Image (cartoon, rainbow, N blue to C red):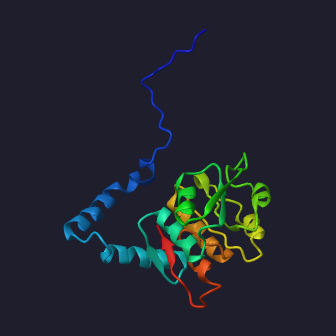
């Protein structure tokens, strides 16, 4: 027996609005205040965001950037990664992961993922490390944290590990960022670890 098809039923692939739906009234109020002030660059809202982010993450400082891609590029450039270098990233990810690597002048090397977690497979990453490898850029996909301990172990010989957070839940992102700081892994919201070997003083975190 044929199964009836209801073409009027649409199931969205991603419901982005669900992430912030409960906050819409407050968001509209705060956005209205910014529009009324006419200060769209820096200003008290950005200062408050940076201050509160740093306090929540336990970082000395936080610096707001335009977006996550810019934060990745800045982190890669801060580590001196550029032309002739390779950065390993997952083959299953948003294009901005490889875009940031290319913008820094390096070459993205795509590694396979774990079929269960959909995150980087450390064993496959290990097989792709070459003398030109300067960083590993894991992605926390769909809120599932990548195996950072295993990936960090691959870089024990002073290779920096750049970390891209592409996850949907803000609470997961901030908690993971705090964990990354303790693991000494460069995260989108933590540039301090990348600069730590070069600068003894605490460096700011990037929040994009």
From this viewpoint, which residue is outermost toward the bottom? 200
> Which residue is located at x 45 percent, y 30 percent?
10
Query: Total of numbered circles in the picture?
Result: 0
Q: Is residue 48 visible?
A: yes
- In this rendered view, identify the residue nearer to me: 165 or 33: 165
Which residue occupies the foreground of this view, 78 or 143? 78
Asked whether, in this view, residue 144 is left or right of residue 23, the answer is right
Residue 146, image x, y percentages: 67, 59
Where residue 29 sits, quadrant-wise, is bottom left
Q: Position of residue 44 (x, y in %)?
A: 31, 77
- The single residue placed furthest to the front in the displayed view is 84
Picture coordinates of residue 118, whole percent (x, y)? 67, 49
Residue 172 in view of the camera? no
55 left or right of 42 in image: right
Residue ID at (39%, 51%): 21
Residue at point 40%, 73% (across, down): 49
Q: Quadrant of the N terminus?
A: top right
Q: Classify residue 156 as left or right of residue 30.
A: right
Q: For this view, does 11 lie left or right of residue 48?
A: right
Vertical placement of 16 versus 161: above or below? above
Residue drawn at (64%, 67%) of the image: 84
């Amino acid at each position: 027996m044929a199964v009836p098809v209801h073409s009027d039923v649409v199931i969205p692939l991603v419901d982005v609005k669900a992430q912030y739906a409960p906050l819409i009234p407050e968001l509209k109020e705060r956005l209205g205040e910014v529009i009324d002030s006419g200060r769209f660059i820096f200003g008290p809202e950005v200062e408050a965001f940076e201050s509160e982010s740093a306090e929540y993450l336990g970082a000395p400082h936080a610096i707001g950037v335009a977006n996550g891609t810019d934060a990745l590029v800045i982190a890669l450039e801060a580590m001196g990664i550029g032309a002739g270098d390779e950065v390993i990233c997952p083959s299953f990810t948003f294009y901005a992961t490889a875009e940031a690597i290319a913008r820094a002048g390096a070459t993205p090397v795509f590694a396979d993922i774990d079929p269960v977690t959909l995150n980087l497979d450390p064993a496959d990453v290990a097989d792709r490390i070459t003398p030109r490898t300067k960083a590993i850029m894991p992605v926390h996909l769909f809120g599932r944290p990548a195996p950072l301990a295993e990936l960090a172990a691959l870089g024990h010989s002073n290779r920096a590990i750049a970390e891209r957070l592409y996850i949907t839940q803000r609470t997961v992102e901030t908690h993971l960022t705090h964990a990354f700081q303790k693991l000494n892994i460069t995260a989108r919201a933590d540039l301090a670890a990348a600069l730590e070997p070069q600068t003894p003083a605490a460096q700011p975190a990037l929040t994009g």
